[in-house]
Image (tube, rainbow, N blue to C red):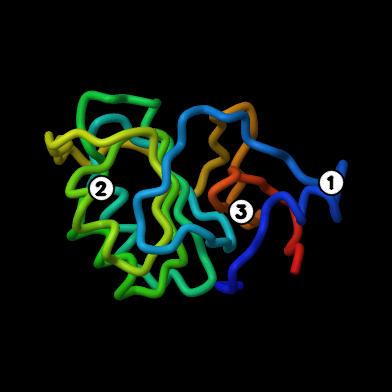
Amino acid sequence: MNDAICTADLCDEYSGSVDVAQPSGFKNYGGRKSFCGEICTVKCFENNPLVKSMLETDGTGKVLVVDGGASLNCALMGDNLAQLALDNNWNGVVINGCIRDSAAVSKIAIGVKALDTIPLKSGKKNEGETGVSIGFAGITFTPGHFIYCDEDGIIVSGSRLH
């Protein structure tokens, strides 16, 4: 599931059976612009220990979707966590919030989408939830469903599309 995908083609082929995220300002920051996988989730606000703990697990075939409440006050991921994700075989990370170290993250061969960048790191309180359905950009991200991302956007399906 780590091959290049095209969300426009998937929308054409599976019209009516995929959810398409509203264009909400997500930008590509990772070294891979096209990525997909099974959804795993973290819901946290301005604290990233749960993001780190998830990325420490085996992410083979998976994408971590993080609902950071669209906060632009601090970064939930930087180059160290992006490298950790790559080292543990994650296909990508989608963050409803910010990252930092964007120049370094762009050189890491992993998909990363986020709203923006900010140099300030997050807090370290172990607060939030993992493995729960989360919603942003007009759609719901449910653990076990599948996400497809490229330069055109983000789509979600209840089943694997290819």
Pointer 1 and pointer 3: residues touching (CB < 8 Å)? no
| Residue designated by label 1 | 17
Q: Callout 3 environment at 10 Å: few (<14), some (14 to 19), or many (20+)?
A: many
Q: Amino acid at mark 1?
A: Ser
Q: Amino acid at mark 2?
A: Met
Mark with earlier residue (3, 2): 2
Q: Amino acid at mark 3?
A: Ile
| Residue designated by label 2 | 77
| Residue designated by label 3 | 147
Q: Callout 2 environment at 10 Å: few (<14), some (14 to 19), or many (20+)?
A: many
Task: Report helix, strand or loop for mark 3.
Answer: strand
Residues under labels 2 and 1: Cα distance?
31 Å
Q: Callout 1 environment at 10 Å: few (<14), some (14 to 19), or many (20+)?
A: few
Q: Residue at x 59, y 43 (%)?
A: 153
Residue 22 x %, y % = 62, 29
Pointer 2 and pointer 1: residues touching (CB < 8 Å)? no
Residue 5 x %, y % = 64, 63
Task: Report helix, strand or loop for mark 1.
Answer: loop
Residue 74 x %, y % = 20, 31
- Position above or below: 115 against 88: above
